Amino acid sequence: MPEAWHGFRPERLAAILEAIVDAGVPDNGLASGFLMFVRGGDAGRFEQHDRRTAAQDGASAHAGAGAGAPADAPAASAPASSDVGTPPDTTTEMPAVMKLAQAIDLRMRGSVTEALALLDSIGAVAPLQPVFDARGGWDLMITVQHGITAILAGQFDRALTIFTGARFQASFASLVCLSRDALVKSALLHAAFGDQREARIVLDHAASLPRSISWIEPRIDVTAMLAESMLDTTPPDLALETVHSLPLADVGEMWPFYAIALHRAHVRAGRVQDLSARIAMLEGIPFPYVPGKGFSGSVLPLIRANRALEQGDARSAAWFAAAADQEFIGTRLVLMRIEARGNRPQRALRTAARTADHLGSGAMRRLDLWRSASIVEALLALDREDEALLVLRASASIAGGLSESERELFPVEVRRFGSVHLPAASASPSASATPDLPDLPVLPAPPAPPAYLTPREREVVEMLATDLSRADIAAALYISINTLKKHLRVVYDKLDVTRRDAAVLRARHEGWIGPAAPGTQHPRSHSAS
């Protein structure tokens, strides 16, 4: 069935499947289930399917039970043919196909969170098949759909993990388009939000795979073109021309990335005068999204918010950001910058704490740097320069150095601060560096700490990362306040800091403690209270 889906145009395959279902050909429900997949997003199809098959289901149950069998006995199942493949379900073929169909139906209506939950229930059933695929391509097909849904739900880290899993799946020559699709969507994520070097590698890998005759190949090509347009190595004018020349009919569900690429290309090319009109045009198109839900329901208001920030209008930016999904990582990062520039730096740092778990893997490099830039901006507003330097040094020493577009994520004030306090090393200035707009230096990796932390000192630092007072920490450790103060002097000296917050920040950057949200308490604090 996956080969049929990618070989026939959807409308042709739907007509074939409808003929099979209407003729009552015995197929163990696979044709009717796959028809629901093909018709995903077509209003009312699931209700029509339920009414159409209700009588057939009852008749099949009696026929399959045989003479003398109870009326509620399950129908006998015909074995799946080798060229169809078995969907990854441990009981029957039907549930997995129907879940996939329902997930796509939900996704095409903008209910991306519900669609993701449904696909999660399928993905948990079948183990990875890295050598042989005994299910006719079902695993790879479901994995790719799972990753697409995670993207639209705004779970970018998770989508990359899913697509990486797809690269380990065994593949058929006739389904190589699925492997290419997983690759170019990974590249698209990296080009927009992650590591552009990785995007280039993955795009080259996708280009090396043979092309199929599937109808999805033009859509894969357009996805690759979107990714290419967002790479720093693509000249700004060429990026703008690429975005404007895309065949929009093949953009498909990747339309949120089209909006981002459009915004980025216009800004890079210095053609922002007509950008608002183009975004307004996109807002008038009935794309499949629920406002304020996931990535798809947040991308347009967040582009508006970013544009307002670029114009120095934090108030309008906040108004637009309020229309986006408040749990989406992109919304939280925009709110951080709004708060940092709107005289609410403490609130920006609290928002940063809530984003730590979302960016813990480091896969979304660009989003990580955006977060770091806003943290530095907030810390400088609070005159906490030692902590700001720690964050800035960690950002400037990122693997491979900062690209030009990554440097531009840092506000002008932050770049001026970095040019004064961080000695430039081994890096040529970016094209955008001027005397009025200094470059952010690229540094070698920070030196190792002057001394390791003992287990007791690490325990002290872990408690500093909580909301416990000094008295509570001392009580939890069963030591006096004076003994705690001695520990703190040693810890601060080893970490080369002078404040509690700076010690926690340094310890997190060194990997000695993990991220923790405000309000976290140490387990011992319960027994100490």
Image: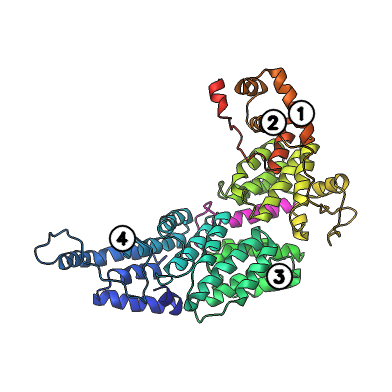
The stretch in magenta equals 286-311
Q: Earlier in the sequence, mark 4 or mark 2?
A: 4
Outermost residue toward the left in this view: 68
Reading the image, the residue beneath label 2 is: 457
204 above or below 373?
below
Element under label 4? loop
Give how far apart the Cα atoms at labels 3 and 1 are. Answer: 55 Å
Q: Residue at x 79, y 42 (%)?
A: 389
Give how far apart the Cα atoms at labels 4 and 2 are. Answer: 54 Å
Disc nearest the viewer among 3 and 1: 1
> Seen in the image, is 410 located left or right of residue 327?
right
Q: Quadrant of residue 256?
A: bottom right
529 above or below 36?
above
Q: Earlier in the sequence, mark 2 or mark 3?
A: 3
Element under label 2? helix
Q: Residue at x 42, y 56 (%)?
A: 124
Reading the image, the residue beneath label 3 is: 240
As shown in the figure, which amino acid type bears the numbered disc 3?
Leu
Reading the image, the residue beneath label 4 is: 91
Reading the image, the residue beneath label 1 is: 490
Q: Earlier in the sequence, mark 4 or mark 1?
A: 4
- Which residue occupies the foreground of this view, 94 or 480? 480
